[in-house]
Amino acid sequence: MQTLIFNQGDASESRIYYCAHYLAHSLGLFAAQQLQVIFTTSESGGHTVQGGQVPAVLNRDADLTLGGPMVVMKHFQQHGAELQCFCASVAANPWFLAAAQAQPDFQLSDLRGKRVLDVGNVGTATLTFRWLLARHGLQDDVELIAGSGDQARDFNAVAQGAADYALHAMHMLAPAIAAGQLHNISSLASVCGHVPWSAYIARTDVLQEKATAFAAFSRAIAQALTWIANHDATALAQQVQAFYPDYPREALVRGLAAYQQAGVFAPDCVIPRAEFAHFSQLLTAIGWLDSSQPVPYAAQVTQAGAEQ
C-alpha cells in the first residue's frame, strides 16, 4: 500500500466542486489502486502561492494539493518549473450569477445597466468576470460592486433589490438558492470556454519520486469523474455528504446538479493542451500573468496515470 499526503488548505477550500477525491475515497477507488490518501489541512488557504496548501507542498509537508493552474503558472514565472499540475479536477469556471427572481431567458447582454455584487471578491474570478464583460462590450455598462465581506448581508442585499445580481461560486450560492432567497440565473462556464480552472498539483521532483503513487491517484480520480458523469446529483450527494457535514442536504444536491449541468467537472484526468493555452491567454489578458514570459504547457503539466 502506497501513501500520499494531500493538503487541502483551510476549511474554505473544501468546496463542493472539489468532491472528486472525496468520491474516490467513498467508493473505495483509492484502496482499489492500493493507495492510501491522507487528507490534511492548513491554517490558511488561498489562491496564491502564499496560500496555506501550496507552501505545504513546496516544503514537502504534503505530497499534493488541489488548486488553480493559475497558481502554477504564476509560480513558474517567478521561480521556474518547481510545481506541476498532474491531474484534472475542474474543467470550467465554477462561478454563477444569482438574482432575487428567476430569469429563464437570461442573456449576458441583460447585464447592461445592472449592478452585480461580487460577493466572493476572489482575485482571478473577479478579473475573469471583468474580462468576460469586456469581451461582450459591457465593461462600461455594468456596475461591479465589491462584496462587503459578509456573505449573508450581500445575499440579502440582492434579495432586497440593492443590487441586481450576486456573483459567486455555486458552493456558496446553493444554500441561499435552496432556501428560496435567490435564484440561479446563469453559469459562467460556457461563456468563458473550457479552462482547467482547478487541478491536482505537486512538486515536479516529488511527482518523479512517487510516480507510481501519483499514477494510481490519477486513475482513481478518473474513475470518480466518470462516476460523476453517469450518476445524478442525489446519488453523488449521498456519497460525499459526510465530507460536508455542515452543508444542507438540499443545497448540496442543488449545487452539485448545477455543476453537473454546467459541465464544470472535468470529464477525465487529462489536462488538455489547448484548454491550458486558452486559460494562460485569458490570465495574461486580465493581467494575472506577465505577458513577456510564456508559460509552456510541457513545463507545467504532466499526465500522471493518464496513459494507463
Image (tube, rainbow, N blue to C red):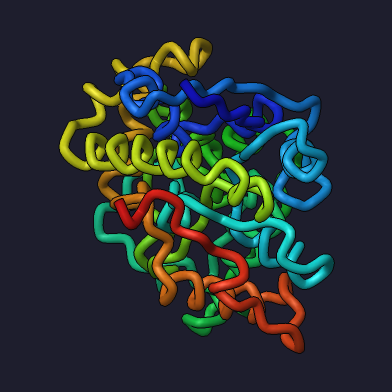
> Looking at this view, is 71 or 156 the one in front?
71
Q: Position of residue 260 (x, y in %)?
A: 29, 43
Q: Position of residue 301 (x, y in %)?
A: 54, 63
Residue drawn at (52%, 46%) of the image: 211
Q: Position of residue 246 (x, y in %)?
A: 52, 12
Q: For residue 226, what is the image quadrant?
A: top left
Relative vertical location of residue 248 with respect to residue 30 in this rendering, above or below: above
Residue drawn at (41%, 37%) of the image: 216
Q: Is residue 302 visible?
A: yes
Relative vertical location of residue 67 with respect to residue 173 in this rendering, above or below: below
> Looking at this view, is 173 or 31 the one in front?
31
Q: Position of residue 1 (x, y in %)?
A: 46, 20
The furthest residue to the bottom = 292
Q: Disc count in the image?
A: 0
Residue drawn at (60%, 53%) of the image: 68
The furthest residue to the left = 230
Question: In the figure, is residue 251 to the left or right of 290?
Answer: left
Q: Is residue 162 visible?
A: no
Residue drawn at (42%, 58%) of the image: 92
Relative vertical location of residue 44 with respect to residue 269 in this rendering, above or below: above
> Looking at this view, is 38 or 163 the one in front?
38
